[in-house]
Image: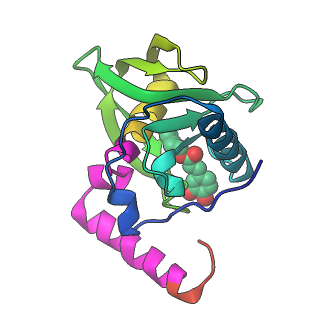
Amino acid sequence: MAKLEILEFPDPRLRTVARPVETVDDGLRGLIDDMIETMYEADGIGLAATQVNVHKRLLVLDISPERDQPMVFINPEVEPLTDEREGYEEGCLSVPGFHERVERPARVRVRALDRDGQPFEMEADGLLAVCLQHEIDHLNGRLFVDHISRLKRSRIRKKLEKVHRQGVSA
Ligand code: QAP
Ligand code: CO
């Protein structure tokens, strides 16, 4: 297993739209294991392949308090189940040190393939729904900062650019 490098906003590679996975094989499962390790080492609850500069439709997450229930979604498709929107204070491993409230549909259905390539479907609400929508945004080249005001986004961009110039972390 290996820890992968996480791209940080405003890296333009985070804007890449990921392509569907065609075959779920041992090579992909190796990447999945590396992404899970990278997520745990960075204290994250979700990580999309885009964030490690792999432009495949694949994400991992673990919202369990014990951090022992990793979930894998390959080629995920999300569909809102309600018009009701809920606000949540979101962060992102690609936007370290910043959190902002984002509103999204409160309940969703997701269809995806598991790590054996088998299709499954689940309904989600609460943090799981937030996390799934946040990670699927990454696969479409979108970040949570795209859901906040231009002023806030540009402040975050300037602060992270400064951090990157100085070569330290936020
Ligand atoms: C997405 O984000 C998410 O700034 C996953 O210094 C976040 O794992 C979905 C993290 C919140 C829903 C709600 C962020 C770790 C982790 C930071 C993350 C940081 C260290 C973010
Ligand atoms: Co993120």
Q: How is the image coloured?
A: rainbow
Main secondary structure along the magenta-highlighted residues = helix
Quarter assignment of residue 65: top right
143 on left or right of 124 = left
Of residues 3 and 63, the one drawn nearer to the viewer in this rendering:
3
| Residue lying at 70% horizontally and 25% vertically, measured from the top left | 69
53 on left or right of 29 = left
- How many marks on residues? 0
In what quadrant of the picture does the C terminus appear?
Answer: bottom right
| Residue lying at 44% horizontally and 21% vertically, measured from the top left | 112
Q: Which span of residues is magenta-colored? A: 137-164
| Residue lying at 47% horizontally and 84% vertically, measured from the top left | 162
Of residues 160 and 79, the one drawn nearer to the viewer in this rendering:
79
Residue 38: % across, % down = 68, 50
152 on left or right of 111 = left
Residue 115: % across, % down = 60, 24
Q: Is residue 145 above or below residue 18?
A: below
Would residue 88 be seen by someone viewing this image from the given angle?
Answer: no
| Residue lying at 50% horizontally and 46% vertically, measured from the top left | 49
Of residues 78 and 120, the one drawn nearer to the viewer in this rendering:
120
Quarter assignment of residue 106: top left
154 on left or right of 39 = left
Would residue 136 be seen by someone viewing this image from the given angle?
Answer: yes
Residue 85: % across, % down = 29, 27
Residue 121: % across, % down = 44, 11
Q: Is residue 110 above or below residue 13?
A: above
Residue furthest bottom as drawn: 166
Residue 165 painted magenta: no
